[in-house]
Image: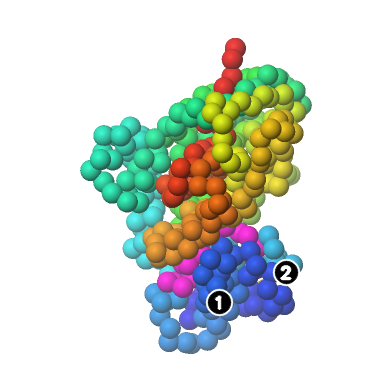
């Protein structure tokens, strides 16, 4: 038996099945055992009975989740399974949680080393390990250029801070440089680069709630110390995590939650009033695919589609990349069907270009790219001339 009462999870469930239609694990395995509903029932059972099922076994099943939040978005009853699972994991910590915590907290030191040494180390590695290392390298693309001519921004002269996210900060600094140039071009008054903590999303979903709270407290205190400026981000998951901070107990001042939510802006939303040109350096045999990551807003690609030339075909992929949650530690083999399901969307093309607007998705898509696709964050393709 576990301490929390998870009974609302199932009592409110009307068995409509909408969560099954969107869950990447259920969709890619067709196994009801991995569905959101099954996990919700399991948590409820555990909270109300003296079942002999060990916490270890339940954790194993509850850990099979990508924390993508697609079930929550689809649920008419607002059942938030990923948050319940995070709480559950926090109540039954394991060595895997500890390892996850160490991995995330060591990123400021390990990511720069791994990113720089990727070309030298990769010949000695194989398979996914090699691909994971190479995915940390800065990219140079020649296939597409997004050239910004002007950005008419309603944020002109407003004060702003850039929240780049860990992968950008410690491995892909080129994204930060490009993002700054876009912000300057938009007329924003960009303040310095503070010592942000991780957005805390991965660590929270692994059940390390105390650690994630400490990170959130640091980020909130930075924002306050700069006079509550806009927080500009180019990572869909960072934005989602920063917005989710209003649900945490952070000693918010009166009306401050609203101020916080209004301060968080994605750079792609600034671009909706931009003029850009798009050039392809070599002819693409297939379309450019735009990845709609789990935590991206529905208008994430509006700026690109508005400016796209009619000569280029665009497709969208609205599927989970498989990076989220702590599945990679709990059951790494379960990633394969999820990844295969995403790439099956473009299997008839075999080459092309896949753009994303999430730092973590870029990493995962690049790691598991099975064919001759070029993958990248849209910032990889931006060229700005002074
Ligand atoms: S968060 Fe995603 S992977 Fe987890 S149960 Fe919900 S839809 Fe499935
Ligand atoms: S979408 Fe919500 S109400 Fe419908 S089956 Fe899933 S958990 Fe239950």
Q: Residue at x 30, y 34 (%)?
A: 119
Q: Are marks 1 and 2 in contact (CB under 8 Å)?
A: no
The percent coordinates of residue 297 (x first, y second) are 68, 46
Q: Is mark 2 within 8 Å of ligand 2?
A: yes
The percent coordinates of residue 220 (x first, y second) are 58, 40
Which portion, as a residue range, is magenta? 59-72
Q: Quadrant of residue 314?
A: top right
Q: Which mark is residue 77?
A: 2
Q: Looking at the picture, does residue 120 appear above or below residue 103?
A: above
Question: Which residue has dot 1 on it?
Answer: 32
Q: Quadrant of residue 224?
A: top right
Viewer-proximal residue among 97 and 273: 273
Q: Sort mark 2 into few (<14), some (14-19) or many (20+) by Cα contacts within 10 Å.
A: few
Viewer-proximal residue among 119 and 298: 119
Q: CA distance from mark 1 to mark 2?
A: 20 Å
Residue 368 lies left or right of residue 164; in this view the side is: left
Element carrying mark 1:
helix
């Amino acid at each position: 038996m576990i301490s929390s009462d998870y009974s609302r999870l199932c009592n409110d469930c009307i068995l409509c099945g909408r969560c099954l239609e969107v869950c990447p694990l259920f969709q890619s395995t067709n196994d009801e055992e991995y569905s959101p509903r099954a996990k919700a029932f399991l948590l409820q059972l555990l909270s109300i009975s003296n079942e002999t099922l060990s916490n270890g076994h339940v954790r194993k099943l509850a850990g099979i989740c990508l924390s993508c939040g697609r079930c929550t978005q689809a649920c008419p009853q607002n059942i938030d399974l990923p948050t319940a699972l995070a709480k559950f994991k926090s109540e039954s910590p394991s060595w895997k949680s500890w390892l996850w915590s160490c991995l995330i907290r060591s990123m400021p030191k390990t990511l720069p080393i791994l990113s720089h040494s990727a070309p030298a180390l990769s010949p000695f590695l194989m398979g996914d390990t090699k691909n994971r290392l190479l995915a940390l390298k800065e990219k140079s693309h020649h296939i597409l250029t997004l050239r910004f001519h002007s950005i008419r921004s309603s944020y002109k002269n407003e004060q702003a801070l850039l929240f780049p996210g860990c992968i950008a900060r410690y491995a892909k600094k080129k994204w930060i440089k490009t993002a700054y140039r876009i912000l300057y071009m938009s007329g924003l008054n960009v303040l310095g680069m503070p010592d942000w903590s991780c957005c805390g999303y991965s660590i929270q979903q692994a059940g390390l709630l105390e650690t994630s709270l400490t990170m959130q407290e640091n980020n909130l205190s930075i924002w306050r110390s700069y006079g509550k400026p806009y927080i500009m981000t180019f990572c869909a998951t960072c934005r989602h995590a920063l917005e989710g901070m209003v649900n945490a107990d952070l000693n918010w001042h009166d009306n401050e939650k609203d101020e916080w939510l209004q301060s968080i802006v994605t750079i792609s939303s600034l671009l909706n009033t931009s003029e850009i040109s798009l050039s392809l350096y070599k002819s693409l045999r297939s379309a450019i695919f735009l990845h709609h990551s789990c935590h991206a807003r529905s208008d994430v690609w509006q700026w690109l589609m508005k400016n796209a030339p009619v000569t280029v075909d665009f497709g969208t992929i609205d599927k989970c990349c498989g990076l989220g949650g702590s599945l990679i530690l709990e059951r790494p083999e379960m990633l394969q069907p999820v990844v295969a399901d995403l790439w099956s969307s473009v299997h008839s093309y075999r080459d092309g270009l896949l753009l994303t607007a999430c730092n973590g998705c870029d990493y995962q898509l690049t790691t598991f790219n099975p064919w001759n696709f070029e993958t990248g964050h849209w910032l990889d393709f931006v060229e700005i001339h002074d």
